Amino acid sequence: MDELPDKKSVGDAAREVGRAIVSAIPVAGGPLQVLFETVFSAPLEKRKQEWLERLADVVNELERRIDGFTPAKLAENQTFITVALQATQVALRNHQEEKLSALRNAVLNSALPNPPEEDQQLIFLRLVDQLTSWHLRVLALFDNPTRWMERHGVVNPGWGVGGVSTVLQHCFPELRGKREFYDQITRDLQTDGLAMQGQFLHLTMTGNGMVESRTNKVRS
């Protein structure tokens, strides 16, 4: 019987991949170098380490899900390398969990069998970089409101009639009374092709319609 792969070695290999990716990011010289060393160095190192841990977790998950997978195979996957490099640059510029989780999942999906088309993956990374954490939270809810409530422990009232805005404010109480704000978020998602078009937020519809998916299946 073959021995099981050493989990520690898998993690170490993932960190080596991550370090190679992070080291590819240039650092400015001169006065900017001084500013970097005195202000940004420690926080950036912390972000690097946290991102490397996420990359290690990606490799461990790939090992669990793909028969015969080894970290060395990632070096032969050019799409994975490109996506991981792009995701790393975005990750180091951000701290919100919603963004980091989306980036981690994008890197994972790039190495799974039958991944999204490469340009589609890169568009997704650009959008993660540009959008706010609220955009990503609302997008996740719009994708499948019923499943979102189950995952986040939010009671599903089983509405009989109402609007999508009712679902939105129920799941995110902090958005109550902020119609202009969440209307803008929805418009942004529609402009980027992530949410379905149409004025669905405030239309009165059946309970089933209130929790239908409102996203386009274009995400990584």
Image (tube, rainbow, N blue to C red):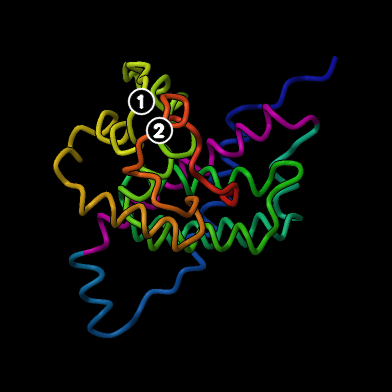
Give the mark, 2 or 1, whose residue is nearer the N terminus: 1
Corner quadrant of residue 29: bottom left
At x 35%, y 20%, the residue is: 159
At x 25%, y 80%, the residue is: 32
Q: Residues within 10 Å of mark 2 (few under 14, many from 20)?
A: some
**Magenta stretch, overall SS:** helix
The residue singled out by tag 1 in the image is: 161
**In this view of the protein, which residue sits in the foreground, 207 or 63?**
207
Residue located farthest toward the bottom when viewing the structure as drawn: 30
Q: Are marks 2 and 1 in contact (CB under 8 Å)?
A: yes
Q: Residues within 10 Å of mark 1 (few under 14, many from 20)?
A: some
Q: Is residue 51 magenta?
A: yes
State the extent of the magenta-drawn residues as a range. 40-67
Image quarter where the N terminus lies is top right
The residue singled out by tag 2 in the image is: 205
- Pinpoint residue 211: horizontal percent, then vertical percent: 44, 30
**In this view of the protein, which residue sits in the foreground, 195 or 7?**
195
Tell me which amino acid carries mark 1: Val
Secondary structure under the numbered disc 2 in the rendered image: strand
At x 46%, y 60%, the residue is: 127
**In this view of the protein, which residue sits in the foreground, 57 or 188?**
188
